Amino acid sequence: MNSSQFIMDTYRRVPLRISRAFGCYICDIENRNFLDTYGGLGVHVLGHNHPELQQLLREKSGSYLHLSNYFESSEAAALAEKLCCETGKNAVYFANSGAEACETAIKIIRKHWGGKRAAMVTIDGNFHGRTMGALSLCTRESIKAPFQPLFPSVVIPIGKKQRLDSFFSKDTAALFIEPLQGEGGVREIPQWMLEELIRLQKKYGFLLVQDEIQSGMFRTGKFLAGNSVSSHADIILLGKGLGGGLPLSACIVNEKPTEVFTPGDHGSTFGGNPLACGLGFKTLEIIRRDRLDDLLVKKGRRFRKKLKDVSARRPDLVKEVRGKGLMLGVDLKDSAAAAKLKDHFFDNRVLVNVTAGTVWRLLPSFLIQDSQLDMICCMFAEFLDQYR
């Protein structure tokens, strides 16, 4: 009997039955190793089963697996302090997923304004999660349409340089920015646009929410992809790699929203799980200690150049290579080409992900080697030469 028949059909699953994972590889039940560029969709920043994380997990689980948030957790307190130091903010609320962190931000915004302001502004291509509030701030109609009516939101298009005053008013409660859009196709918000939005924040006084769920945790070489925005952000959202492979997200706030919540306003049974927080703290410690942030900048720059060089042989097929660090995207001419690319890599035992229909998105472990990235470029070149 196929046990998957009892799981709701919400994913187009890779035809692979997995037995184990290690480093940058996933191994199937036939003992075939596949190079993994999904990285758990940005979760495994240190790869699968990092030895130091495994050791810590064994040690911590010997004491307890879970506590209630009615008890203080030294692991959560230590990670919260580290996150405040990294971001320059004041307080942290821990949840389990990026969508939950976004929902927390929405509740903070609502309570902060107390009904005086209600309008939420988002940017075309943003993705914040699939719960109702987070989904309302996404802009891809195909994932929103079945669940209407959602909360109203104002959408700013990404286009030529212009003043954006018309999208804001004294009723604007908050603006959500995803500085480097993940699900939107690995698109970076232009610097002129960020500067214009910061000007409007000063003019209208709305709260600014910076979503770094996919692009944060040093994915681009910096702790946050949107460094030029973070000092102006009232709320920063983190997730994905934050828990070292376990479910963990964070809603980090500055002085304005810090006192908004009081006991009973919000909560989560598993948010801030001590094992996840312990692994998160250790992950950040390893990245800093081993200077992985500096290394991945060099690695990403070299890889991006190679991808661009390879892409140049088929300008009819590849529209653009974009992204930063080890969050890169290759935009192909159509979804058919993207699907064929995915099959080509799978046949060569490399697992690749396609988002926004046409964008080959790479979110590998920070520990992936240049030789492995070179192999990916060679396979990409083979695909471009063969595709007709």
Image (cartoon, rainbow, N blue to C red):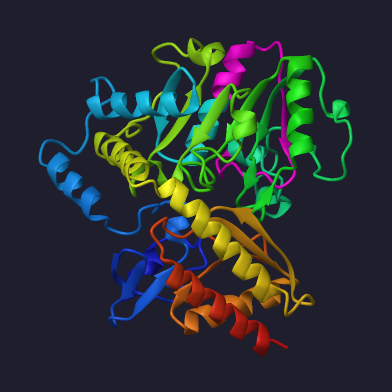
- Residue 94: x and y, percent? 40, 30
Q: Is residue 343 visible?
A: no
* Chain part drawn in magenta: 106-132
Left or right of 324? Residue 332 is right
**Which residue is rendered at x = 54% and y = 81% of the image?**
379
| Residue, far left | 62
Snapshot quadrant of residue 272: top left
Given residues 39 and 286, the one toward you in this image is 286
- Residue 302: x and y, percent? 56, 63
Is 44 above or below relative to 315? above
- Residue 337: x and y, percent? 68, 77
Left or right of 256? Residue 238 is left
The quarter of the rendered structure image containing the N terminus is bottom left
Q: Is residue 378 visible?
A: yes
Given residues 262 and 6, the one toward you in this image is 262
Given residues 338 and 4, the one toward you in this image is 338
The quarter of the rendered structure image containing the C terminus is bottom right
**Which residue is rendered at x = 64% and y = 30% of the image?**
229
**Which residue is rendered at x = 71% and y = 50% of the image?**
140
Given residues 274 and 312, the one toward you in this image is 312
Q: Is residue 256 magenta?
A: no
